[in-house]
Image (spheres, grey):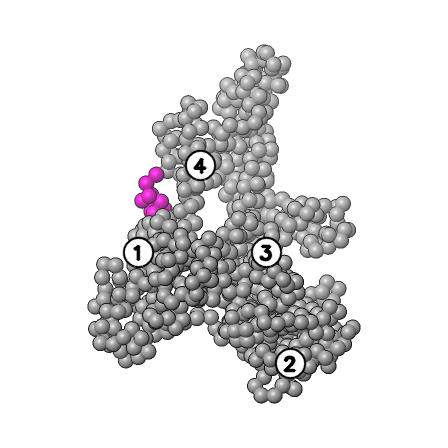
């Protein structure tokens, strides 16, 4: 298969220029990563972003899979001796997976069907006679076929009808017609399995005990909820168009009049639709709708994960982290600027132990001894009470007081029990590891969260119900994109963070850490070439995303790629200054005319990026962290009153709205219709993860533990 065919198809499917697609495919074939292509090969791609490059890669893989399927189909039909030039051309020209399977269906080896049995009995000629509908007496036409295993005329006619039914079900035109009906008018129906209706497991699916709606309007979250109910044996799901209309349309193609033969053909068409054709297309649409729902859920998850990973970091500060608890106490850890564990202990300021005074003294001592600059409190059980306790303690602290933050605990317990945590802290128990994770999330959320399986972070929607391979691939791409967009400090990054850097992976990441441990901190990017197994290709891919702050060469702390250092050095020579001067002095950069530096290897897009980077070298794209406080006196659902306005934090975003923590141990839902005064298509257009918002309480359903909130009419 020629590459230009793929290029043309991808270009048409994605509405991108063939030149940009061809350039991108060439780079992907050479092993370049998506972040590297998007950042450092804009000339070759015409400036495509990561989303577009990922789409090209996905389309390329899909079309290659179709080509493999075409090769298999062609071989199978050739082996049967049934290939014709026209059929081969149709297969070669087809790039639609469903249509390709329709073309192949009549030739596809299948189990011994009723039609196959009838053919073995020699009844195919009779089926063709009936289809022509020229015989006035079908019984008389069937008489010559009554022999061998065909005992009578009725058996002969029924066998012929079985053959016609299968022919109808395998006919391309028939399948497209029914497929079109499913696409336009199919209704998805959900019914409860009566034997399970009154069980506790069924209660969460009560909305779908008797539910139906057009399939094309069924949202991702509803479809996945119904499919989960079906998987658990509580719901029975069907997808169907109007059967009578479908049968009537099919009969118009096969039945030529109200004749005896016509009636037999009409019965065969009816049977072919109900027994063969409809179940086949229903399965196809069940799979297709599930795939589309999966894609939407994965998109939402990836979008939330991106926002979470790019959450504002506090930066390198000395942090006290507290994992709150009542009976078992609060686990307290003290971390240095790099997130290293310096001290840990347990305090018991809450009931039933109530050693509040002792806990207060210990916290004050730790703040003073470890020069604590910030305090991170996990947002789980006893979070509000612990925050109140720490606020009281801070009132007794002299001088500059540490800043206080509440940090999400999602996934911390998963990390604390993981091999990564055991390797980092082999001598500490899970409570210490969990508290360390909370503190490190405040210092740098990205560096800490990459250690946790994204599915455990709690920002997804039905993530355990979607295609797990597709989910993992998309989440890995999201993590890789975030890590490379921020950049990584080569001298402080863990191997878990380094493995997501373009061109590295687990082995090279470990080799970098081992080299750093053996030889001390890296002093230049060029030193990476001494790392075992890190060859020229890997260096090309990773170097631009690795930073060395305060390096001898200031470009080593920037996103300028080493392959472009000579360009910047020439700029500095032309301005009769050093590279450091070029970075620090705006007036020197203002004198540079970048068109002068365009070469065959370096185009304007790269030069524009270089100038932006010289203005703010190594700039972190993440926002500044902000402090937040829940409403005082509102600590449980019982404290809520409809109509009250409260501060909250967005904890999860779905395609039907946003969940908001208002400090009552139960998140409330702002439905998409309540997010803004105007129509909202995508909740992400209005809110972002961990955003501080003000909400109004609409309704409190204490029986089901649901809180309905609104942001409409709220003054910003």
| For the residues bearing labels 1 and 2, Cβ distance under 8 angstroms | no
Q: Mark 4 near mark 2, Cβ–Cβ under 8 Å? A: no
Where residue 28 appears, x then y in whole percent? 37, 50
Count residues near mark 4 (Cα–Cα under 10 Å), then give few for <14, some for 14-19, many for 20+: some
| Mark in front: 3 vs 4 | 3
Residue name at image x 73 percent, y 52 percent: 201
Which label is found at residue 44? Answer: 1
- Number of on-image labels: 4
Give the mark nearer the N terminus: 4 vs 1: 1
Which residue is the site of mark 3? 419
Quadrant in which the C terminus appears: bottom right
Q: Residue at x 52, y 20 (%)?
A: 124
Tell me where residue 131 appears, x and y as whole percent: 51, 25
Dot 1 or dot 2: first in sequence order is: 1
> Which residue was labeled with disc 4?
69
Q: Secondary structure at mark 2?
A: helix
User: Which is nearer the N-term, disc 4 or disc 2?
Assistant: 4
Give the secondary structure at mark 1: helix
Q: Which residue occupies 60% across, 33% down?
A: 275
Q: Which residues are magenta?
A: 1-9
């Amino acid at each position: 298969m020629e590459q230009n065919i793929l290029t043309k198809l991808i270009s048409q499917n994605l509405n991108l220029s063939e030149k940009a697609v061809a350039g991108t495919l060439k780079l992907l074939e050479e092993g370049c990563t998506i972040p590297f292509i998007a950042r450092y090969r804009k000339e070759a791609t015409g400036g495509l972003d990561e989303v577009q490059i990922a789409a090209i890669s996905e389309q390329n893989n899909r079309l290659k899979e179709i080509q493999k399927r075409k090769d298999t189909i062609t071989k199978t039909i050739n082996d049967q001796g049934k290939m014709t030039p026209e059929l081969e051309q149709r297969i070669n020209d087809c790039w639609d997976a469903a249509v390709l399977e329709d073309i192949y269906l009549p030739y596809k080896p299948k189990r011994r069907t009723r039609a196959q049995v009838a053919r073995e009995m020699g009844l195919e000629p009779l089926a063709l006679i009936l289809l022509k509908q020229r015989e006035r007496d079908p019984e008389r036409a069937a008489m010559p076929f009554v022999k061998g295993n065909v005992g009578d005329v009725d058996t002969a006619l029924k066998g012929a009808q079985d053959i016609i039914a299968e022919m109808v079900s395998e006919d391309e035109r028939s399948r497209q017609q029914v497929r079109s009906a499913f696409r336009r008018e199919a209704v998805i129906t959900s019914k409860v399995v009566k034997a399970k209706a009154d069980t506790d497991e069924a209660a969460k699916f009560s909305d779908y005990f008797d539910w139906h709606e057009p399939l094309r309007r069924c949202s991702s979250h509803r479809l996945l909820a119904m499919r989960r109910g079906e998987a658990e044996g509580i719901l029975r799901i069907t997808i169907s168009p109007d059967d009578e209309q479908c049968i009537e349309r099919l009969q118009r193609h096969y039945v030529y009049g109200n004749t005896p033969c016509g009636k037999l053909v009409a019965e065969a068409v009816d049977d072919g639709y109900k027994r063969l054709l409809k179940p086949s297309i229903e399965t196809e649409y069940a799979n297709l709708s599930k795939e589309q729902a999966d894609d939407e859920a994965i998109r939402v998850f990836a979008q939330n994960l991106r926002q979470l990973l790019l959450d504002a970091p506090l930066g390198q500060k000395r942090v006290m982290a507290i994992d709150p608890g009542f009976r078992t106490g609060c686990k307290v850890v003290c971390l240095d600027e790099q997130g290293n564990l310096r001290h840990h202990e347990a305090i018991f300021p809450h009931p039933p132990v109530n050693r509040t005074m002792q806990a207060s003294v210990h916290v004050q001592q730790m703040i003073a001894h470890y020069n604590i600059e910030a305090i991170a409190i996990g947002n789980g059980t006893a979070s509000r009470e612990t925050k109140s306790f720490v606020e009281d303690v801070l009132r007794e602290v002299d001088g500059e007081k540490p800043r206080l933050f509440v940090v999400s605990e999602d996934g911390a317990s998963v990390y604390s029990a993981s091999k990564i945590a055991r390797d980092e802290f082999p001598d500490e128990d899970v409570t210490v590891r969990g508290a360390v994770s909370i503190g490190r999330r405040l210092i740098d959320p990205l560096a800490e969260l990459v250690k946790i399986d994204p599915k455990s972070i709690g920002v997804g929607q039905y993530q355990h119900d979607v295609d797990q391979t597709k989910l993992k691939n998309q989440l890995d791409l999201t993590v890789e994109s975030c890590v490379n967009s921020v950049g990584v400090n080569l001298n402080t990054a863990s191997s878990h963070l380094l493995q997501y850097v373009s061109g590295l992976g687990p082995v090279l990441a470990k080799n970098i850490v081992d080299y750093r441990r053996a030889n001390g901190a890296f002093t230049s990017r060029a030193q990476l070439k001494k790392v075992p197994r890190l060859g020229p290709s890997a260096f090309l891919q990773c170097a631009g995303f690795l930073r060395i702050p305060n390096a001898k060469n200031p470009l080593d702390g920037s996103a300028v790629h080493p392959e472009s250092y000579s360009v910047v050095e020439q700029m500095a020579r032309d301005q009769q200054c050093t590279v450091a001067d070029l970075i620090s002095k705006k007036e020197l950069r203002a004198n540079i005319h970048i068109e002068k530096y365009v070469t065959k290897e370096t185009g304007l897009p790269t030069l524009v990026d270089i100038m932006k980077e010289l203005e703010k070298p190594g700039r972190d794209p993440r926002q500044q962290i902000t402090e937040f406080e829940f409403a005082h006196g509102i600590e449980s659902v019982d404290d809520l009153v409809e109509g009250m306005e409260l501060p909250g934090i967005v904890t999860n975003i779905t395609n039907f709205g946003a969940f908001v923590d208002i400090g009552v141990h139960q998140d409330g839902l702002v439905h998409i219709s309540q997010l803004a005064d105007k129509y909202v298509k995508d909740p992400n257009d209005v809110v972002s993860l961990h955003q501080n918002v003000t909400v109004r309480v609409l309704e409190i359903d204490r029986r089901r533990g649901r809180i309905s909130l609104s942001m409409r009419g709220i003054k910003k």
